[in-house]
Image: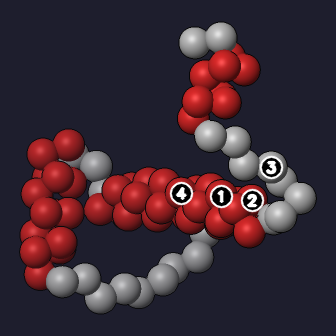
Amino acid sequence: MSTTISVRLPDAIAKNLNEIAKITERPKSYFIQKALDIYLKDQVDLQIAIDRLRDVSDPVISLEEMKRELDV
């Protein structure tokens, strides 16, 4: 199942999207879906990192401590 969503793009992004779609012979929606999927996964990772930084029970170690622990 899929959902249709309208989005307004700046002209430069729309032009780049049209060009890459033409060159690769793929639909523009393919690239929009891929880009959005990557972006959303990155946002989840970022939120996890921020939550861990704010968690006082999650110890933070220095780079030197990490190197010692990993014997690097």
Does label 4 or label 2 sit earlier along the sequence?
4
Q: Amino acid at mark 1?
A: Ala
Q: Nearer the viewer, mark 3 or mark 4?
A: 3
User: Closer to us: mark 3 or mark 2?
Assistant: 3
Q: Earlier in the sequence, mark 3 or mark 4?
A: 4
Describe residue 59's horizontal placement relative to residue 44 as left or right. Answer: right
Task: Label 4: state its secondary structure.
Answer: helix
Real-space CA distance between mark 2 and mark 1, rounded to the nearest whole angstrom:
5 Å
Q: Is residue 44 visible?
A: no
Nearest to the eye among marks 4 and 2: give it.
2
From the top left corner, tell me how far across and down residue 50 is, in percent: 65, 65
Give residue 11's position: percent from left, percent from top. 11, 81
- Mark 2 touches mark 1? (CB < 8 Å): yes
Question: What amino acid type should be assigned to the residue bearing mark 4?
Answer: Asp
Q: Nearer the viewer, residue 36 or 69?
A: 69
Q: Amino acid at mark 3?
A: Pro
Neighbours of disc 1 within 10 Å: few (<14), some (14-19), many (20+)? few
Tell me which numbered mark, 3 or 1, is placed earlier along the sequence.
Answer: 1
The residue identified by callout 3 is 59
Query: Residue beneath label 2, please?
Result: 52
Q: Is residue 20 left or right of residue 39?
A: left
